Amino acid sequence: MINFENMDQAQLVNTLAELTEKYKEYAAMGLALDMSRGKPGGGQLCTSDPMLDVLRSDSDMNTENGFDARNYGLFDGIPECKRLFADILETTPDNVIVLGNSSLSIMFDFVSQCMTHGAGGEPWISQGKIKFACPVPGYDRHFSILEYFGIEMVNVPMNSGGPDMDMLEELVKDPSVKGMICVPKYSNPTGITFSDDAVRRIAAMKPAAKDFRIIWDNAYVLHDLGEESDRLLEILSECEKNGSGDMVFEVASSSKMTYPGAGVAALASSKNNLDFIRKRLFVQTIGHDKVNQLRHARFFGGIDGLKAHMKLQAEHLAPRFQIVFDKLRESFGENGIASWFEPRGGYFVNLEVPENCAKRAISLCKAAGVTLTGVGAAFPYGKDPGDSNIRIAPTYPKTDELSAAMDVLCLCVKIAYIEKNSKQKLLP
């Protein structure tokens, strides 16, 4: 393997010329490869197709409590679906509300409710400038919600066990800090799962703001890639132990378990929070798609059936992640110009390249027909302070396409690095 760090100027220039010729070969192929979002691939989606026949072959459309799922009512979810999500989130059905198809919509509505009606106190919008702690790199959609409502975002760096807890504990001493938003298991995009210590310290926090709320987006709670998986400590009971049961608002969905856009989403929180949310829901809706809730509940038949289904999904995902790991090791395993974490689940691989190289590498990839997540997307306001973060989404492409896309990406990172150090450019 070539060690670029030990090259003199002449060697850098010669290597850049060689890599540029290789890049031109890829650019001439007319590639159209997409690694921009964490979307399920076609084969993965097919694992859920039998669900479409569940109700067709069963004329009984009543829920387990005798309610006709085709009608109005049960606006906070059918009982069997509540129980399923309670098992997913390791809580009780009394702590769960099942809603529509989108956890992102649930989070948006919750922030909106806090802005206009508060979180157990004065509306946030009446309290002047408010702030949220945002572990970074993080999920761009979270940041979009906060930016939409004019909430100032404060970066909290992620480490190997979750957010920098010393920084977070200091930050919440500011009463203008009203919350934190995060993906605690197989975090998007780092793939890191919060350690037990981090979860306990989060649950034990005593923020200066009494209306401080944590949006705990447990998007990848069952999305393991193999038998060895991460274990996330359950947050709601930890908060209860610390007398802070109202602090956490947890969400999850089946969007990446069955069909994005046609799944089921749920939230879990304290009785106080759920009662407040139900008051809004009573005005907002007469009911969500209970037929879809029933379809999901019967298809899985319970948490064991769901876990078996997720193993089928892992059979599609694990080889794709392995391609990414293999290509990164092959290209950067010994030369030290890039680093990455190999998660045991989730949907992303986080690649850290040298400072001031990510934007150039992503631009070169796009010109060669490989689309990646936008520059800075994993940071609030789209501003990556080091211009060094690249999010890899390996789930959607076919394996041969993914392999080619990774070859292009690794090549472009090398070119960006050598351009920076040789102060020469052979490509526009």
Image (cartoon, rainbow, N blue to C red):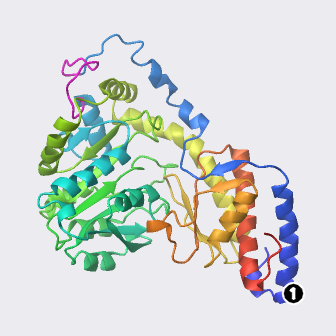
**For this view, does 59 lie left or right of residue 177?**
right
Count of picture labels: 1
Question: Which residue is at a point 61% across and 51% down the rendered structure image?
Answer: 394
The part of the image, by quadrant, that contains residue 265 is top left
Q: Residues within 10 Å of mark 1 (few under 14, many from 20)?
A: few
Residue 222, placed above or below residue 365: above
Question: Which residue is at a point 16% across and 59% down the rendered structure image?
Answer: 123
Q: Quadrant of the N terminus?
A: bottom right
Magenta region, main secondary structure: loop
Classify mark 1: helix, strand or loop: helix
Q: Residue beneath label 1, please?
A: 10
The part of the image, by quadrant, that contains residue 280 is top left
Residue 137 makes an appearance in the image: no
Amino acid type, label 1: Ala
Q: Where does the image place residue 382, in percent across and percent down from the top left?
A: 49, 66
Tell me which segment is drawn in magenta: 64-78
Residue 179 makes an appearance in the image: yes
